[in-house]
């Protein structure tokens, strides 16, 4: 009873282990184990699943990235996903065990060697039964070399291995089962035979031969039985010596692994395994001993060598052991064959995988080539865009530079304009200042011999300043030169420049002295009245003088910011230079100096005009306008025609025209007047001298066009005049402003005027300002005027 109770407690603590892969075959194996062992009271199950270690993380293209090259978060996520899938795969097997009310433990192992991992797990605990799946019936034969055979070889000998396939079952018994079977065979030969045939479902031809031999030995005499048994064993061993040697060697290794991994197993099982291994090795290592015993038995008498009953039992025991070893060797052979088949299959699979990987590699190469082409296209596109952007940038920079340059030029022009405006409207004088000592020295202390004119408010002297002949007007009143009007006159006269306006060269403001250019032919009044027996002026020159005076008046009236009205235009204020070039004097006096009553340079003059030249409406209302100068200009035209005083001159001319005797009142000293042109000029003078301002013609729109037409007639007449007259007069633009003579080498200075080279170079040695404008020159460079030189040479050739 005690032994039975101990046995039941031991069995209750034992565990059935089931190695599963996770497929349909694993379901069948678990179901078989439940049906097999649950009725026998085995209610503790252990599900063992072995998976290979994770070597890398796969990509969508099927490329495996090693763990060392992948990111930690990616590796962790991949491992979590694999673990979750593995748990989901094992969940149905757990439910199968729970449904049968069986306690189940799930063990998941990570190893590349499935057989070793399963064997080590079995060796750790009280596992007596191991159920595995199998692909064939004879998995324990020497021809089979699959995973099931490997697991059977590596599993410790204290554990029984069940290889389950559909409709088939193979069992590798444990050492304890073998010992019990041998003990039962020693008690009864018949029961041994039946038990051995019932315990092992997988038998071979060798087993049948052994059983038949055993039966024959049992019925014969002891000597014959021993001889036949030894002969049969010897033949069997000789035929399978090589395979048994390999089998026992592998079995010895399996036993050694079993002994290392089953430290918790019983001592009985370990001792028995060692004794079996040593006995098997002794038998196989010396097969000649069996031959020796067999041959020597022939020489021994049978009666003396008949075995005893105990001897017979030992022989039977040895036969059974050899039979079991033979079966194991056959199983190992089958395992080897299975492994060979698996290796071939794996080789084929590897070849297929290699071809697939090769195809994938080709696809990857093609994709890389496409990607490279795309990258090259994108690179070219980027380079083109970069070049275009660079071109646009250069254009923008160039435009910005040009814009900046234009802006700088505009700023510079604006500054120059402001500077010029400041110069024109500033308080600083734009004329040359002469010292009082220079004036006194030039006029020889105001010598009477140099006096050329006298007025109510000043005396005019002819003198030379800086090698230039000038006219110096010295005011009588000391306070006049300090008045505001005098300063304004200086500013106006120094800023306006016109070929037919008298040029102010400088002044001595401290003593009221004005320095003008010298007009050698006096004024128009003296020449018309032929005072001092002067030469008469030809009619065509009078036409030209009328046009020059009109152009100067138009210039004054169009000046800015305010027009300048002369208010005292008369023949006495029209000065004649060399070649009878006319220039208007006293410019700005009547406009700027309303109450100073300054006279002209040469003759006496009234403060606000001269009688017979003053606008009648201005006399009545005191309102001055541009038409006031037009009235005075009409009187000048009539005097140019008649050379008579201005008193009642309009009545005389109008009466002559109405009476048809205009020729009678014309100046006969002027030559033969062209009647129609002279009549037009007379009528123009009368229209300008109308009493009412609104009846007078406009200077620019009517008077100047008429005078230009008459000037053309005068120019034609001048060319047809006598040679003497032509020789006596040279063109105005041939005259040097400094020498007042025809230039030999005309050159253009920085002020824009043309001078004779020798005269201007002598001037520059003593002065830095222009002799015409009296303003500082930016430089002293001279530009030859070849055009004017050619004209002068042609003119001189005609004079010969």
Image (cartoon, helix red, strand yellow):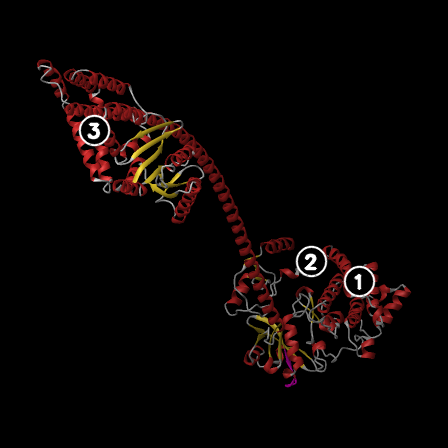
Q: Identify which residue, 453 or 283, lies in the foreground.
A: 283
Q: How far apart are marks 1 and 3 (CA)?
A: 145 Å
In this rendering, which labeled residue sits more in front, label 1 or label 3?
A: 3
Q: How far apart are marks 3 and 2 (CA)?
A: 153 Å
In this rendering, the answer to whether 363 lies above or below 409 is above
Quadrant of the snapshot with the N terminus: top left
Residue 721 drawn at (x, y percent): 73, 57
* Number of numbered callouts drawn: 3
CB-based contact (under 8 Å), mark 2 and mark 1? no
Under tag 3, what secondary structure?
Answer: helix
Q: Residue beneath label 2, please?
A: 726
The quadrant holding residue 436 is: bottom right
The quadrant holding residue 727 is: bottom right
What are the residue bounds of the magenta stretch?
473-479
Residue 382 drawn at (x, y percent): 49, 44
User: Could you say which disc has been placed on residue 702 in the image?
Assistant: 1
CB-based contact (under 8 Å), mark 3 and mark 2? no
In this rendering, which labeled residue sits more in front, label 2 or label 1?
A: 1
In this rendering, the answer to whether 375 lies above or below 187 is below
Under tag 2, what secondary structure?
Answer: helix
Q: Which residue is drawn at 66% across and 73% down?
A: 492
In this rendering, the answer to whether 485 lies above or below 170 is below
Residue 461 appears left or right of 207: right
Of the two numbered discs 2 and 1 on the same chain, state the one appearing first in sequence: 1
Of the two numbered discs 3 and 2 on the same chain, state the one appearing first in sequence: 3
Q: Residue beneath label 3, please?
A: 249
Q: Identify which residue, 55 or 342, lies in the foreground.
A: 342
Q: Identify which residue, 762 or 190, lies in the foreground.
A: 190
Residue 183 drawn at (x, y percent): 22, 30
Residue 478: say if magenta.
yes
Q: Identify which residue, 354 or 540, lies in the foreground.
A: 354
């Amino acid at each position: 009873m005690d032994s039975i109770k101990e046995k039941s407690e031991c069995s209750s603590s034992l565990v059935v282990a089931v190695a599963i892969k996770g497929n349909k075959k694993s379901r069948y194996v678990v179901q078989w184990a439940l049906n097999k062992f649950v009725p026998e009271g085995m209610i503790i199950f252990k599900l063992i699943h072995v998976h290979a270690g994770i070597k890398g993380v796969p990509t969508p293209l099927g490329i495996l990235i090693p763990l060392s090259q992948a990111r930690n978060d990616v590796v962790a996520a991949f491992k979590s996903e694999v673990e979750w899938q593995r748990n989901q795969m094992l969940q149905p097997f757990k439910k199968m065990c729970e449904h049968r009310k069986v306690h189940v433990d799930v063990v998941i192992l990570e190893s590349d060697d499935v057989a070793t991992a399963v064997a080590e797990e079995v060796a750790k605990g009280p596992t007596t039964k191991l159920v595995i799946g199998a692909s064939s019936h004879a998995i324990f034969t020497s021809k089979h070399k699959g995973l099931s055979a490997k697991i059977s070889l590596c599993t410790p000998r204290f554990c029984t291995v069940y290889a389950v396939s559909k409709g088939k079952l193979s069992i590798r018994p444990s050492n304890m089962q073998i010992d019990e079977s041998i003990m039962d065979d020693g008690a009864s030969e018949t029961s041994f035979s039946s038990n051995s045939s019932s315990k092992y479902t997988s038998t071979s031809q060798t087993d049948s031969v052994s059983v038949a031999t055993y039966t024959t030995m049992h019925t014969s005499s002891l000597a014959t039985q021993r001889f036949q048994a030894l002969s049969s064993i010897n033949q069997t061993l000789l035929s399978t010596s090589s395979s048994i040697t390999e089998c026992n060697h592998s079995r010895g290794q399996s036993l050694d692994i079993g002994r290392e991994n089953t430290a918790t197993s019983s001592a009985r099982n370990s001792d028995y395994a060692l004794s079996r291994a040593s006995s098997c090795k002794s038998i196989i290592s010396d097969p000649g001993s069996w031959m020796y015993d067999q041959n020597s038995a022939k020489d021994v008498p049978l009666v003396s060598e008949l075995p005893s009953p105990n001897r017979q039992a030992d022989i039977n025991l040895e036969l059974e052991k050899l039979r079991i070893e033979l079966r194991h060797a056959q199983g190992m052979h089958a395992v080897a064959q299975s492994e060979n088949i698996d290796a071939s299959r794996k080789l084929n699979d590897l070849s297929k995988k290699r071809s697939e990987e090769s195809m994938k590699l080709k696809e990857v190469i093609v994709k890389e080539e496409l990607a490279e082409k795309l990258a090259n296209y994108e690179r070219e596109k980027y380079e083109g865009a970069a070049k275009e952007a660079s071109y646009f940038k250069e254009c923008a920079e160039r435009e910005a530079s040009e814009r900046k340059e234009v802006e700088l030029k505009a700023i510079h022009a604006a500054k120059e304009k402001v500077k010029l405006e400041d110069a024109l409207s500033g308080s600083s004088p734009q004329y040359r200042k002469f010292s009082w000592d220079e004036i006194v020295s030039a006029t020889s202390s105001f010598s009477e011999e140099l006096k050329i004119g006298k007025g109510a408010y000043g005396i005019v002297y002819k003198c030379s300043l800086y090698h230039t002949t000038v006219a110096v007007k010295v005011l009588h009143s000391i306070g006049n030169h300090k008045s505001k009007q005098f300063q304004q006159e200086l500013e106006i006269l120094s800023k306006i420049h016109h070929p037919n306006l008298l040029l102010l060269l400088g002044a001595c403001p401290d003593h009221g002295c004005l320095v003008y250019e010298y007009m050698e032919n006096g004024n128009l009044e003296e020449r018309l009245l032929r005072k001092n027996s002067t030469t008469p002026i030809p009619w065509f020159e009078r036409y030209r003088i009328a046009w020059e005076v009109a152009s100067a008046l138009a210039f004054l009236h169009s000046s800015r910011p305010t027009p300048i009205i002369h208010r005292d235009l008369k023949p006495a204020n029209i000065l004649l230079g060399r070649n009878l070039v006319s220039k208007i004097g006293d410019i700005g006096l009547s406009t700027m100096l309303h109450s100073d009553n300054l006279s002209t340079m040469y003759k006496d003059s009234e403060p606000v005009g001269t009688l017979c030249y003053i606008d009648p409406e201005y006399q009545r209302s005191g309102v001055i306008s541009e038409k006031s100068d037009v009235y005075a200009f009409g009187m000048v035209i009539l005097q140019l025609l008649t050379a008579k005083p201005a008193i009642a001159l309009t009545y005389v001319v109008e009466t002559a025209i109405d009476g048809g005797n205009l020729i009678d009142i014309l100046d006969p000293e002027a030559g033969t007047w062209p009647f129609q042109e002279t009549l037009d000029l007379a009528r123009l003078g009368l229209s300008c001298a109308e009493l009412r301002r609104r009846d007078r013609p406009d200077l620019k729109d009517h008077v100047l066009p008429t005078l230009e037409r008459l000037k053309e007639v005068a120019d034609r007449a001048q060319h047809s005049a006598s040679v003497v007259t032509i020789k006596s007069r040279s063109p105005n633009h041939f005259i040097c402003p400094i020498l007042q003579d025809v230039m030999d080498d005309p050159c253009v200075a920085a002020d824009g005027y043309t001078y004779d080279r020798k005269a201007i170079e002598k001037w520059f040695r003593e002065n830095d300002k222009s002799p015409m404008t009296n303003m500082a020159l930016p430089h002293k460079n001279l530009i030859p005027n070849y055009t004017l030189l050619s004209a002068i040479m042609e003119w001189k050739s005609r004079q010969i």
